[in-house]
Image (cartoon, grey):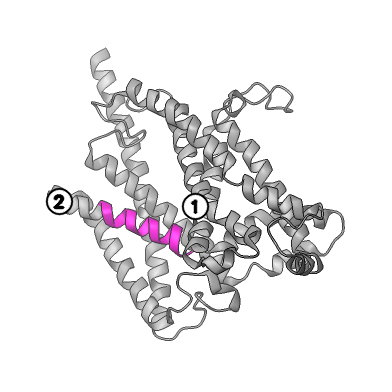
């Protein structure tokens, strides 16, 4: 009886994991169907095409894409994606399954790393600055809300779709490897060996993520103190008159705060709340509290860094090298932060409630 009960419990847990997996797939299909319909609408001249609608889209990879062409591409990729997700479970060929997994990862990369531009990161970084200004009665909060236009909203929609496609790709990959659909550990998984690697590399990657924005922070805080570090006196005066120095300093303070939180990924207080925190002191930190915001920020930083690197010219580095060159470290920052988040996730994993591994 005990053996049969154990079998039924294990089967029930596998069924729960399968249901969760299907819900992820259905969510991706629903998102893809809706956005594919928008693409078809834009391809026939429909209004609201969100790419390159304003001059602020200068940093977008798709600023020159026409609504007819890109709308048709969106519609075609959406149809292919839906077919791929619906047919994965019926495919017996491992080669075809690999193609579907690769297609899913490609969709995630396109939606997360090529459609969003620097405006998303700037919006997230300025949010606390604008909120503080709004609390003290300034008009900066209303000005901030005016920057949230349809193209920006569309980028958030695409980023959400990219994360959904990434989750679907992970799910398909686990199914392909015959691993647990809940935790991803396979029958032959060597947790001890993998944990040694996580501990070894996680600390170094996290330190890289902390140090990478330091160059940016130093230049912006120097400007705030009246020191035109890395820029000409004329450029310094222009930045001062336009308020860009205060804005840059605000972003530097946000970056410093982020570096402190990043250190929590390898610190004891990143696993257990410090005792001085009201109501939560001494309690276990839910992994998602750190993983979700840090993972999202790593994507936005990487996107901005990629655009800076792609648009960079040697002439930009002189004579105002302090304005541009610190941004060239943003891809390193974003990728390192993403790696630190992954290591934190693996380090915080406990025994799976469904497979027991």
Q: For the C terminus, give its image quadrant.
A: top left
Q: Residue at x 60, y 47 (%)?
A: 213
Q: Nearer the viewer, residue 78 or 243?
A: 243
Task: Specify the label residue 331 is tagged with.
Answer: 1
- Residue 277 against residue 25 in the figure, above or below: above
Question: Is residue 91 toward the left or the right of residue 299 in the image?
Answer: left
Provide the secondary structure element on which disc 1 rests. helix
Q: Is residue 107 magenta?
A: yes
Is residue 356 visible in the rendered image? The answer is no
User: Left or right: 225 with respect to 311?
Assistant: right
**Mark 1 or mark 2, whichever is nearer to me:** 1
Residue 60 position in % (x across, y down)? 50, 70
> Magenta region: which residues?
101-116
The part of the image, by quadrant, that contains residue 355 is top left
Characterize the local packing of mark 1: few (<14), some (14-19) or many (20 or more) Cα atoms within 10 angstroms.
many
Residue, x 62% and y 23% (percent of image)? Answer: 283
């Amino acid at each position: 009886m005990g053996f049969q009960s154990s079998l039924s419990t294990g089967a029930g847990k596998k069924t729960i994991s399968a249901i969760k997996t299907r819900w992820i797939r259905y969510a991706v299909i629903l998102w893809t169907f809706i956005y594919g319909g928008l693409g078809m609408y834009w391809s026939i001249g429909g209004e609201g095409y969100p790419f390159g609608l304003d001059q602020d889209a200068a940093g977008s990879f798709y600023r020159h894409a026409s609504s007819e062409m890109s709308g048709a591409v969106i519609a075609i990729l959406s149809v292919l994606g839906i077919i791929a997700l619906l047919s994965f479970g019926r495919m017996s060929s491992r080669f075809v399954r690999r193609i579907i997994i690769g297609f899913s990862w490609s969709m995630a990369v396109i939606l997360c790393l090529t459609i969003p531009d620097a405006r998303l990161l700037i919006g997230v970084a300025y949010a606390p600055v604008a909120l503080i200004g709004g609390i003290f009665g300034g008009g900066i909060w209303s000005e901030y809300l005016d920057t949230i236009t349809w193209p920006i909203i569309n980028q958030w929609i695409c980023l959400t779709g990219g994360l959904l496609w990434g989750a679907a790709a992970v799910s398909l990959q686990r199914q392909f490897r015959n691993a647990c659909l809940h935790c991803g550990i396979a029958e032959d998984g060597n947790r001890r060996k993998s944990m040694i690697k996580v501990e070894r590399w996680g600390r170094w990657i996290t330190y890289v993520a902390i140090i990478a924005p330091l160059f940016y922070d130093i230049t912006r805080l120097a400007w705030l103190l009246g020191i035109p570090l890395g820029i000409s006196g004329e450029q310094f005066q222009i930045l001062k008159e336009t308020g860009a120095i205060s804005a840059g300093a605000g972003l530097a303070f946000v970056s410093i705060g982020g570096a402190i939180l990043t250190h929590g990924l390898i610190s004891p207080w990143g696993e257990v709340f410090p005792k001085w925190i009201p109501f939560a002191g001494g309690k276990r930190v839910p992994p998602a509290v750190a993983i979700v915001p840090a993972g999202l920020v790593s994507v936005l930083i990487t996107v901005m860094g990629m655009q800076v690197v792609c648009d960079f010219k040697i002439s930009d580095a002189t004579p105002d090298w302090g304005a541009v060159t610190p941004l060239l470290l943003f891809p390193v920052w974003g990728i390192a932060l993403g790696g630190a988040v992954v290591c934190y996730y693996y380090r915080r994993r406990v025994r799976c409630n469904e497979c027991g591994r």
